[in-house]
Amino acid sequence: MTDKSPAPEKQSPQTSVWEMEPLPPTASRNGGWSLVIMLCLMLGVISGYVIFHHDLGSGVMMMAASWLVFWVALIILMLMAIALILALRGYWRLAWLSGAVAVTIIGQAIIIHDLRSVPLSVAVPKDEIMVTALVVESQRYRGNRQQIIIRLKDKSPVADQFADGSARLLVPSGAPPLLPGDVVVMQVNFQPLLPQFLLGGYDFERHALRRGILAGGFVREIVSITPGQGWSLAKARRSFQDKLFQHMDNAWGAPVASALLIGYRAAIPHDLREAWRGAGLAHLLAISGLHMMLICSVIMVLVRSSLALFPVFSSRFNPLKLSALLALPLCLFYLFFAGVPVSALRAFLMLGLSLIAVLVSRRGITLHHVQLAAIIILLCDPSSLFGPAFQMSFSAVFGLVVVWTYWQQYRPFRPISWPLRLVRYVLAIALSSVIATLASLPFALHHFGVTTTWSVLANVLGMPLMGFVIMPMGAAAVALAPLGFEALPLSIMNAAILLLSHFASVVSGWQGARLAVLPPLALATLGLASAFMIMALIQGRWRWLGVPLVGLAVLLWAIQQRPLAGVILDYGKPMLAVTSHDGRLVISSSRDDGFAARLLATSFGFAEAVYIRNHEDSVCGDGFCTVLSGNNQVIAMVWDRRSLTKSCQNAILVLTLVKAKYPCVTGAELIDEPMLYNRGGMLIYATSQGQSYRIKSVNIAE
């Protein structure tokens, strides 16, 4: 008989889960809502800042903004209701448009509220006064000094001025340790906050005021200390920092460990900070995704390894989900222990979303999580959008997640040998360094005007040391410190930090390690960032619209005019600067490596400045110097009023540190002492005619 049973079906080759369930694209329709909300919030914050930033200083505008709160809320509710009605009727595009407009207005409302909530700086007394203050925060500072933040008690002479804020003081070396919670009677010399030195530059005063710090100053004498009682997180941070300095090298090891583990960076020496920055390793000093991920990884590895000792329990409950559930609150505690910086908050939000995704069996790393983290931070702190921490942190992680998503879609899933895994690990570090550098490069150049050339090599050699030795030992030290067993991990961490610091010093000293360029204006920076997002998010041919946008941004940057001269107030003392015809920046101060000199050099697109009397092409006399500027015009710097007449005859622009009794009879442009103090920091540009100048300045006279 013939067997008529059906022939067996031809079996297809075994397919992996990854091939059966491909990863979603970089930007999908389902996850696009977070992108739209993030972009609309950013647009609202930017437009609200541009419209209301300079006007909210007046009392009339403050009152008008208060009256607008009700109407803004009413408009938002109406737009949301319209969007809901349109969505129910099937008009999805109009619903999205109405919702986007509502979110944009929400962004404007929160930035207006944020601008109004920043306190005003106080008029500090000029003389030393005796105060009684509560120490709120304390950390070690360079040169065996301390930096403290205090709140004045009611019986202090200036307590009414500091009722809504605090003051940041430097304590001299040799003083007893001041811990959070201590009540101190001391002689203090208060100083005003550092202002915004240059237009468009970093606003030091506003940054301090947002933290509630109304003034700075110096402690001259400590009369008495009443120790505080009880436990606080600030006291625990200071106590842990003291343990770092007890068990580690006080010059390099302990200051770097303080920055890596608890966010205290004030003790890092200037030369060491510049070495890490020149080697391209400065991003490691800010607590960010790397640190948070390593802390979380150590916790999860320990938990899963411990659960593996109990196979019956592990077979019934998922060890990965249990470790994620335990790691989430511990990482939250570490976030507060580190002081909640923006980069660490972004990292925790993304890490928290990833751990929640693990708990619900979903993919943990997506652009959706990046966008949700940005939305949360913008709602809580909208002004952080304009800071380098937010911009560089999110741009770097955005680029890394985009590339990782595409790599997950196309990489072959097959087992490889250990040597190839090691090679792939090294290549992954190098590629990650390149991606993060390129993604954050527009913002780095906009804020700092400097880029590093050896960062890829430095990260290839430094990241394994950071990931396998420094941070695991640091996490172990944090966990063992309450038991008093932190000495061994801190000694290992100290040796690794010293090795990495010496390596950073060597790399930063190589030829061309730091390249200084003229910082691009905000419009060019925004164009480059927008082009990057278009090419990364849009699918198909439309993504190539980012290419002409890159060209337009680069063109705006290329035609950007370099300042001809500038002035900055260094703690109330004007510092003059001029670009010479040989492409160098000459300044009026012999402190050519100080903070103000470096800030001026960055604004001009130079890496360093030179004292005008040390400049070989300068012509100096008694109380003045002249230099041939970049537009081949003679510019004079004057210190003595008796030299004004001669300088006016020889120069077309005269910058003087004295008050002029009359203008230059030769028609030369004269900027004297009253103008310097009234305008504050200024940048001077030559007009197209070359005989007149336009000035951009921070007006501090109001």
Image (cartoon, rainbow, N blue to C red):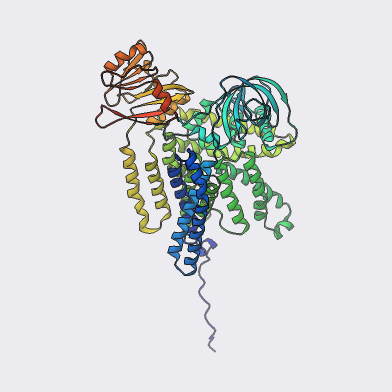
Measured from the top left, where is residue 275 in percent x and y? 49, 29
Measured from the top left, where is residue 431 in percent x and y? 46, 44
Which of the 4 image quarters holds residue 613? top left
Q: Is residue 667 left or right of residue 367?
A: left
Measured from the top left, where is residue 628 in percent x and y? 29, 21
Q: In which quarter of the image is the N terminus?
A: bottom right
Q: Residue at x 44, y 49 (%)?
A: 43
Rendered position, 330 above or below 625: below
Q: Residue at x 50, y 46 (%)?
A: 65
Residue 620 can be seen, yes or no: no
The one of 673 and 684 positioned closer to us in this rendering: 673
Q: Is residue 442 left or right of residue 73?
A: left
Residue 682 can be seen, yes or no: yes
Measured from the top left, where is residue 323 in percent x and y? 66, 51
Numbered label tally: 0
Rendered position, 352 above or below 522: below
Which of the 4 image quarters holds residue 448? top left
Q: Residue pushed farthest left? A: 689
Q: Which residue is drawn at 61% across and 59% down?
A: 360
Which of the 4 image quarters holds residue 468? top right
